[in-house]
Image: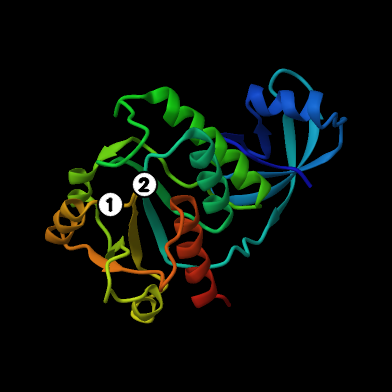
Amino acid sequence: MQRYFVNSKENNIIIINKEDSHHIKNVMRMSLYDKVELIYENTIYIGEIIELSDNVKCKIIEEKENKEDKTPKVIIAQALVKEQKMDYILQKACELGLFELIPINTERSVVKLDKKDNKKITRWCKILKEASEQSKRVNIPKIDKILDLKELKEIKADYKFICSVKENTKTIKSVLSNINISDTIIFVIGPEGGLSEKEENLLETYGYKRVSFGHNVLRTETASLFVLSAINYEFMG
């Protein structure tokens, strides 16, 4: 059953935005009385289409139990990469339970973006919404703005990690054993060339700890997926 996130609910009627209404009518070619899954304020509803207009209307016929897996809140501070790679990271990280993604400018980033580039943020939000619908999530990961590395000092989290290739660094396996399901964790992931020693040292002064993925050096678009997969495995019910 197709799933949509919605922002408007009046009693037992849900009104769908124009973009998703277009998808319902012209892509999925649904008809009156067809059923869809609707997510409103993290609650899952089954809706029956009662009006096919510019804003499709659905009548709520059932409220479903939320059985989404419970894991710690994971924030990925991802160095900016080329568009195709960023799209991939957003889609796959969303499927694996990402809580928030923070795009960051770093010394070795091939891509440099203005922190006020709202068009990029809007595009990334759309990718996360679509990936959340596809993967049957009940929430959409956050992505608000592009930050400089030094702004990570202000991020609130129970655990703060730098994904590092430095030798004699603790592995992610060794640090996950200390984490509880109620914790918030942030991982900083560098660009293709990695974070510089200067950047890692700066983050350490902010309370971030270095962790490694073992002996292998991962591509930047693989690192976040490794982190989220490891956490999913650790907390799998």
Q: Residue 15, how many percent across, how many down? A: 65, 30
Viewer-nearest residue: 67 or 201: 201
Residue 56 shows up from this direction: no
Q: Which residue in the structure is indicated by mark 2?
A: 191
Q: Which quadrant would the C terminus be assigned to in this image? A: bottom right
Q: Which residue is mark 1?
A: 195
Q: Residue at x 42, y 66 (%)?
A: 72
* Residue occupying the point 50% across, 56% down: 222
Mark 2: which amino acid?
Pro
The quarter holding residue 201 reads: bottom left
In this image, 32 relative to 7: left or right? right
Q: Are marks 1 and 2 in contact (CB under 8 Å)?
A: yes
Residue 216 appears in the figure: yes
On screen, 232 above or below 145?
below
Image side of residue 62 versus residue 195, left or right: right
Of all residues, the one furthest to the top in this rendering is 54
- Which structural element holds mark 2? loop
